[in-house]
Amino acid sequence: MSRQRAQDLINDGLIDLAVFGTAYISNPDLVARLENNWPLTEAKRETFYGGWAAGYVDYAPHQG
C-alpha cells in the first residue's frame, strides 16, 4: 500500500481505512513519513519470524 493508492481507494469510496502492516514494521515513524512524503524504508522480509529483534525493532526513523 502506498500513500497515493490509499488516498485513491478512499476517494473512490472503495475503502474507509487503509492498512500499512508491513510498512509499519520497517517505518516506526510511518505517519510522519506519509504526512511529509518522505520515502519509506523497505522491510527486510527475510528477517520476519526469525525469533530475534533484527527486522522488527532495528529500523531507524527518517533523518529529515
Image: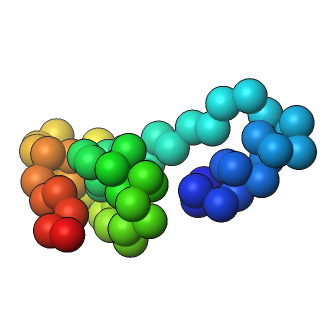
Looking at the picture, how far across and down is residue 37, in whole percent?
44, 65
Count of numbered circles on the image = 0
Residue at 17% x, 57% y is: 61
Looking at the picture, how far across and down is residue 25, in whole percent?
32, 46
Q: Residue furthest front?
A: 36
Query: What scheme was used to colour the molecule?
Result: rainbow
Task: Please determine whether, in this image, residue 12 is positioned above or below residue 60.
Answer: above
Task: Please determine whether, in this image, residue 41 is positioned above or below residue 32.
Answer: below
Looking at the picture, how far across and down is residue 52, in whole percent?
11, 44
Side of 34 relative to 61 (left or right): right
Q: Quadrant of residue 58?
A: bottom left
Q: Nearer the viewer, residue 34 or 52?
A: 34
Q: Quadrant of residue 55?
A: bottom left
Q: Nearer the viewer, residue 9 or 44?
A: 9
Q: Quadrant of residue 2?
A: bottom right
Residue at 38% x, 44% y is: 31
Side of 61 relative to 39 (left or right): left
Residue at 79% x, 34% y is: 15
**Residue 17 visible in the current orientation:** yes
**Residue 48 visible in the current orientation:** no
Query: Which of the image's four quarters has the N terminus?
Result: bottom right
Q: Nearer the viewer, residue 9 or 45?
A: 9
Query: Which of the image's four quarters has the C terminus?
Result: bottom left
